[in-house]
Amino acid sequence: MSGDARKTAEGLTYLSGFGNEHSSEAVPGALPEGRNAPQRAPLGLYAEQLSGTAFTEPRAHNRRSWLYRIRPSAAHPEFTRADNRAVRSAPFTETVPDPNRRRWDPLPEPEPGTDWLAGLWTLGGNGDTTQRTGMAVHLYHANASMDRRVFSDADGELLIVPELGGLLLRTEFGLLAANPGEVALIPRGVRFRVELLDASARGYVCENYGAPFRLPDLGPIGANGLANARDFRAPVAAYEDAAADEPVDVVNKFCGNLWTATYDHSPLDVVAWHGNHVPYVYDLRRFNVIGSISYDHPDPSIFTVLTSPSDTPGLAGVDFVVFAPRWLVGEDTFRPPYFHRNVMSEYMGLIEGAYDAKTGGKGGFVPGGGSLHNMMSAHGPDKETFDKASSAELKPQKIEDGLAFMFETRWPVTVAAQAAGAGHLQRGYDEVWRGLERHFRG
Ligand SMILES: O=C(O)Cc1cc(O)ccc1O
Ligand SMILES: [Fe+2]
């Protein structure tokens, strides 16, 4: 084991650190010493590499893991097409890109027996899965655990943001628990099963087709701050050894479609592993929030948890940004998010409480809901927020009750037809900016 292992509320043990060369074995001696692929791997296991980046990418960004498993992944029957249900992928062509501001209420209650994968519903996205560019925004609402069913996504990594209900993620690398306020990342290609820790589960997913998320550079902030590397936690090895008479449906998302094959064994059969292409969880409450202690409202890039860089320095394919509890102390400052038009496109969600630019409550920006402000669309505080904040007394104020986030992407998000016509799409979102009066008198 590497890093600091610690027990969690769910009784799970984790390895600490972001991008580390972790190693873990569920059975002593399962991990080979001194080489990756001995002539015969220990304990009769099969050695297998899983690459998350090209072999030749710079060492600092290279991601791969070595898995020591009961059966090699190659031993599987043919995949056949499965129903995509509500999952959509890039390129998004069902609707035209829309400059309008959009806001949705939470996903409605699913049918009983809906597991996480069946409850996955795509809002929209950009890029192209076959080019490994862009991203998709999905939401999920589930009320059953995946049973004899495993999922993996060849199209990208999955950043899962629970909003209601905890998830137990059984992955090839071991077990992770992700409760509301935490986020989980499943790397590209990693098989996993989602079990519910509560009666139902609701949340958001950023499917990142591009370069793996990494921690942003800190520049003049210094060597510490924002999301600290040691707060990212990876699982320890744990394997399933289901009997041959327990078939498992393995669903594979590949270039936008779901494919399935029925295995005669669980592919979560990794007894030991080492590497840095690993799943992890991160508690957003550990985010070290940095902001202005003099005046003005900093750009939200200061709240970046993870970034997926593009080929252009500073231009992210997608950033994951969190608006966590924090003090506001700016003097002579309009403290909530300012009015703006952004070349990047912004999908925002709310995990709990309220967001300081928007009114909550029915018809407002509510937990489980989301908003889309595409490239150059004018947005910012709603009228109620503007009126209040421009006359508020500027004593130090703590934003306590709120955990919002943003997937900010370099390209406009084109919505899926089901999102454009959804019953839970709020009608008349533009009204929140109506009545912002003229004060200029010349
Ligand atoms: O639109 C939003 O609410 C997100 C956002 C927050 C902020 O503090 C500054 C700019 C911005 O886009
Ligand atoms: Fe914005």
Image: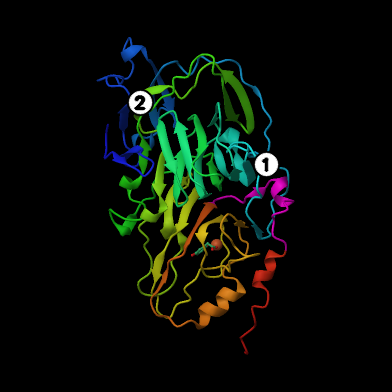
Residue 226: mark in rendering: none
Q: Total number of numbered labels? A: 2
Whether residue 41 is visible, yes or no, is no
The label on residue 111 is 1
Q: Is residue 248 in view from this perspective?
A: yes
According to the picture, the residue beneath numbered tag 2 turns out to be 273
Q: Is residue 100 above or below residue 418?
A: below
Which quadrant: the C terminus?
Answer: bottom right
Q: Is residue 174 above or below residue 95?
A: above
How packed mark 1 is, by other alpha carbons closer than 10 Å (few <14, some 14-19, many 20 or more), is few
Q: Quadrant of the N terminus?
A: top left
Q: Is residue 428 left or right of residue 351?
A: right
- The disc, 1 or 2, on the residue closer to the chain's N-terminal end is 1
Q: Quadrant of residue 384?
A: bottom right
x and y, in percent, of residue 43 in the image: 32, 13
Q: Measured from the top left, where is residue 33 in percent x and y?
A: 25, 20
Q: Is residue 6 magenta?
A: no
Marks 1 and 2 close (CB-CB < 8 Å): no
Q: Is mark 1 within 8 Å of ligand 1?
A: no
Q: Farthest residue in the left direction?
A: 34
Question: Quick one: 320 or 200, which is closer to the camera?
Answer: 200
Q: Nearer the viewer, residue 247 or 430?
A: 247
210 versus 352 height, above or below: above
What is the residue that sits farthest to the bottom in this orientation?
Answer: 441
Amino acid type assigned to the residue bearing label 1 in the image: Glu
Q: Which residues are magenta?
A: 409-427
Asked whether mark 2 lies closer than 8 Å to ligand 1, one says no
Relative to 309, say whether 442 is above or below. Answer: below
Q: Nearer the viewer, mark 1 or mark 2?
A: 1
The image quarter containing residue 375 is bottom right
**Identity of the residue drawn at 52% across and 70% down:** 338
Is 52 left or right of 378, judged from the image as shown? left
